[in-house]
Amino acid sequence: MTPKLAFVLIAASILPTWAQPQFRHGGHAAAVAPLKASGKQVGALHLNSRSALKKHAATPQAATPPAPGVVQIQVVEGNVFAYFIVTSTIPAGSSVGGAITIDNNSELDFDSVQFTSDSAPGDYLVLPSFSNLGDLWPTGIVTYYVDVTVNKTMTEASSQFLSGESFSYSDLTNFAPIITGTSQKIAANKDMILVINGVFTSDTPTVVLEATVAPASTITRVSGSEIDVNLSQVSGLDLTTLNEYLLTVGQGGFADTMLYRYAPAAPNTFNPAPQ
């Protein structure tokens, strides 16, 4: 199947209703964090040729400045759901658009829209979602790009997933950050620490739990294979109950996401987060 034909078919399979439930796991509808400020969803899609695509954070010398947000992607039972989460204030009047590509050949462009009021960290846009990717394009690297223009300066956030593809060891650093797993520990001062394992670049990391943006002061890049987050210092998290979050790590404008399950420790053994 040619790239153009595949993208035409994908365009036809775009979920037609923005209000459809968003899925996180197991095919069941799950609520996402509420939109805190006014924002518009990215609009129609257009088929175009995308040439000379720049690479993401793995080659920072070629990259557009990182956007004030991260792209979260979740693939559930053949359905693809994607979000742009604001990580630092985006002023009113800023514009946002972007594209979906497969193997950097052709692209589906998003219509650009404009923020009508300041958008704060944790606000989100629902990006175009679609289904049956494996039927339409069995193999390929699918990338979402979100371009945010603030005061006439364009910035970019991106994320990707594999369809019928796999990475070898030599590929990992070229596509970092990559999350491979998580664990929890309680520090000596009783703060709850989220340990994120994976492959990470030297760029300053951003960590988002669903639509809660962890303050920079709570994040420590321990090494190229570990990032720690002090959950007890992240306002608004409920550390007393079992919860699931879309966990995203962003570095240099590129991001990776996995489903993270938080399990509480025994009462009075750890410090709760401020509410």
Image (cartoon, rainbow, N blue to C red):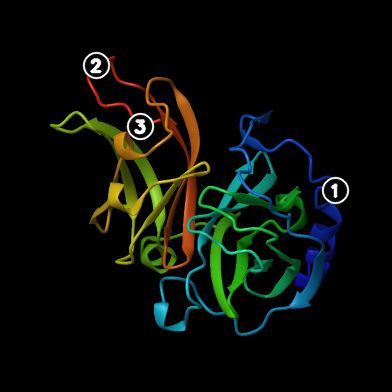
Q: Which residue is identified by label 2?
A: 268
The percent position of residue 194, horizontal first and vertical second, equals: 31, 38
Q: CA distance from mark 3 to mark 1?
A: 40 Å
Q: Which residue is identified by label 1?
A: 16
Tag in front: 2 or 3: 3
Residue found at the far top of this picture = 267
The residue under label 1 is which amino acid type? Pro
The residue under label 3 is which amino acid type? Pro
Numbered label tally: 3
Q: Nearer the viewer, residue 275 or 153?
A: 275
Q: CA distance from mark 2 to mark 1?
A: 48 Å
Q: Is residue 219 left or right of residue 1?
A: left
Name which quarter of the figure residue 31 lies in: top right
The percent position of residue 232, horizontal first and vertical second, equals: 30, 34
The residue under label 2 is which amino acid type? Asn
Q: CA distance from mark 2 to mark 3?
A: 15 Å
The secondary structure type at the circle numbered 2 is: loop
Q: Residue at x 72, y 50 (%)?
A: 129
Q: Which residue is identified by label 3?
A: 274
The secondary structure type at the circle numbered 1 is: loop
Considering only order in the chain, which callout, 1 or 2, is on the residue closer to the N terminus? 1
Name which quarter of the figure residue 28 lies in: top right
Q: Residue at x 36, y 49 (%)?
A: 215
